[in-house]
Image: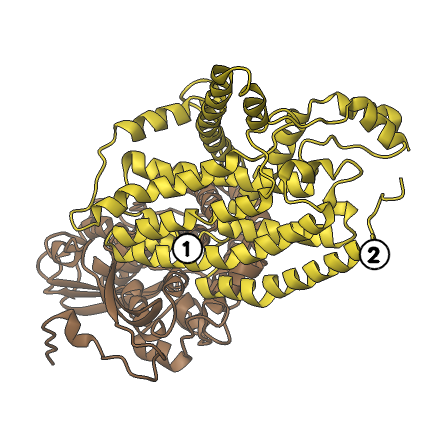
Chain colours: A brown, B yellow
Amino acid sequence: MTVTIKTLNDLVRPPTAADSPMATQEYFVNMGPQHPIAHGSLRLVLRLDGETVRQVIPVPGFVHRGLEKMAEHLNPRQIIHLTDRMDYLSALMNNWAFSKTVEKAAGIATSARIETIRTLMAELQRLQSHVLWWGVLGMDLGALTAFLYGFRDREIIGRLFEETIGARLTMNYIQPGGVMYDIRADFAAKVKELIKYLTRVIGEYDILLSGNAILQERLRRIGILSAERALSLGCTGPVLRGSGVPYDLRKVEPYGVYDKVEFDVVIGTQGDCWDRYCVRIEEMRQSIRIVEQLIDAVPEGPHMVMKFGAKIKIPEGMHYGHLETARGVLGVLLVSDGKSDAPQRVHFRSPNFNNLWAITAIAPGWRIADIIAIQSSLDLVIPDIDR
Amino acid sequence: MGLMTILAAAGPWPVKTVAARAADALPGSLWLSVAYMAIALLAVAGLVAVLGMGLIYFERKVSGHFQCRLGPMRVGPHGILQTVADTVKLLIKEDIIPQKADQAMHLVAPMFSMAATVLVLAVLPYSPVLQIADVNIGVLYVTAVSGLGVIGILLGGWSSNNKWSLIGAMRAAAQIISYEISATLALLAVVLFAGTLSLAGIVQSQADGWWIWRAPGVGLLAFIIYIIASTAEINRTPFDIPEGESELTAGFHTEYSGLRFSFFFLAEFINMFVVAALTATLFLGGWMPFMIGGLETFNGVMALVPPSLWFLLKTAALVFVLMWFRWTFPRLRVDQMMRLEWKFLLPIGFVNLTAAAVLVLFNAYFFSGR
């Protein structure tokens, strides 16, 4: 199918009397690629009628680095480095998604200790990601203090990662066959301290933003994404769950040690921005629950089942694996010829790409300010869209 | 009775403005009169500069401490010279005028904003002897002149030839004009009680008690309405919709840089002072000290604090409240903001004004028996 649009003006519909009692003219505005809302570089072309949004045309691609093509020349261990750079707020989960796929393809069995550490780290990162999202949502809606609070708490989790992993953003921690470094002796104590702190600050978040009448005005009944629409657009993660679909790979296809811990899948009822907000806030509490159950139950054993530098042979064929990152389902498709180290083709099904298009479905009819609220509630990480 | 004795002892609060001094000096010496005027001009110019620097520093420190950080710390002790450094930076920055902008309009827009603000500074009663001119229609003058500021914003947004700027300017015009009505209605309630439009007269009318509590109920309500409406009038969070940095990049001043940008910026900060000072003058007794009837010693101590310091303290407290708003609340959406004004504040303001008129008719003040 080909779509030909000569100029954006071809999209303009002449005003009708139904739109407005006054004769108005629609116009286009570029929101981005350099715009405070484009966390990164995302271009949204808005067709506006006054302040009312008639159409949103996302134009991604400004942070395209060709990660998938680069991966065709690297071995699985090296590709892990690339996965960090997609959704940098879920770096560990990206590592894990790729490692999981490679392990499944190459038949590498990991130990219970490795899986527990992975689950722990992934949940801590989900917390970190959601904490930052909360801050950014505050900033987007004009409450700058929330942004600084979000960053403060993200930093505290980041320090814990730094101690164990040595990196803060591009972790490169979870490898095929294990994790890069073992957790330290005082890790459990520090995580417990962290959890006590986070439980308190999530309460503070509710006081500062969730309970605020202005914030609720800005989010409630805004940008309603129905469950059918969310499913047809391929939305996943909190966006899909906010629309009321209880789809969470941690429950649906348990990996790691998610089948051994108790947690609830949080879902919304209406699919508006407020539901997506509440889902993420509640997911933070669920992540804390998971970490609490696991932190004293890390089994003994090695943190790596194979030697570093050992070649990983991926058998011929197509291999697929996926897991739930902080933003939704990250799928990894590997095609190998069974001979060379490097895969023939790598494709990532990134959650942000699908979630981005939800904005085209739900934004029309709302105001410019609502675009901000909607985009914030979708929690997009632009480099993951462009890869 | 005690309160009146103390007040009488503290002085009859004779008001003598600089303009009055210049007028008195005129028959004797023309030059003395001119000197008074020059002093007044210099004082306002100095006030603008000092206020701008002080308030920006204050805001950065306040926001820093609200956000668990220190704010500026590097330039000078506790960063007190940070604003000086920023000012120098703004002064030497390239002044960019977009090629397709309406150059003349682009040029004068910041001046309008600035002038509207500075003109108000001339009538504020800082203390009994520190006031440049006491216009007998003070409140009317203030509302009229501060309404000029919107022209600067509208011109700036229109002439920039940028869609974001235009949206910001349109929002600003709608917002400021709407909220001006509520603000004026709240001021009128005080005018009814004070029986005068002159700002110095309004301060003097509060010798028996500040209007915020002396006018039964309606004073407090008018105070709340005025704080909300004036926050909107000076485009501060939660009503910073015309700038809305995450929506409109920088709203009406997107295309401004260097000195011209700093004019808008300075006008915004001085507006904050003006609003706080006006609120203090009308509702919190201006330069009147805080006194409680019957507590002679307490009142004696309060009377020792000079009036200008009282004024400054009240204004600073209100400025802090405005900053507190800004660093706590998210931003409203434009239609929600209009709904708040036209469906809530305005009807409440009208009812409040009517109630105030009835109360004044029956002479129902608090503390009026003494």
Q: Position of residue A370 (x, y in %)?
A: 40, 65
Q: Earlier in the sequence, mark 1 or mark 2?
A: 1
- For the N terminus of chain B, give its image quadrant: top right
Does any portion of residue A242 appear in the rendered image?
A: yes
- Tell me if B13 is positioned left or right of B80 in this view: right
- The residue that label 1 is drawn on is B172
Q: Quadrant of residue B276?
A: top right
What residue appears at the point 62 percent right and 42 percent down from the top-left corner?
Answer: B279
Q: From what the image shows, is residue A384 above or below residue B58?
A: below
Q: Nearer the viewer, mark 1 or mark 2?
A: 2
Which subunit holds the residue at mark 2? B
Q: Position of residue A69 (x, y in %)?
A: 12, 58
What residue appears at the point 56 percent right and 47 percent down from the top-left corner?
Answer: B140
Q: Residues within 10 Å of mark 1 (few under 14, many from 20)?
A: many
User: Type of residue at label 2?
Assistant: Phe
- The residue that label 2 is drawn on is B362
Q: Position of residue A105 (x, y in %)?
A: 23, 64
Residue B362 or B350: which is nearer the viewer? Answer: B362
User: Type of residue at label 1?
Assistant: Ala
Secondary structure beneath label 1: helix
- Tell me if B185 is positioned left or right of B29 in this view: right
Secondary structure beneath label 2: loop
**Exactly how many numbered labels are in the figure?**
2
Which subunit holds the residue at mark 1? B
- Tell me if A262 is positioned left or right of A25 in this view: right
Residue A311 or B249: which is nearer the viewer? Answer: B249
Between the residue at mark 1 and the residue at mark 2, the CA separation in whole angstroms equals 40 Å
Q: Are marks 1 and 2 in contact (CB under 8 Å)?
A: no
Q: Position of residue B297 (x, y in %)?
A: 86, 23
Does any portion of residue A108 appear in the rendered image?
A: no
What residue appears at the point 26 percent right and 27 percent down from the top-left corner?
Answer: B92
Q: Quadrant of residue B108?
A: top left
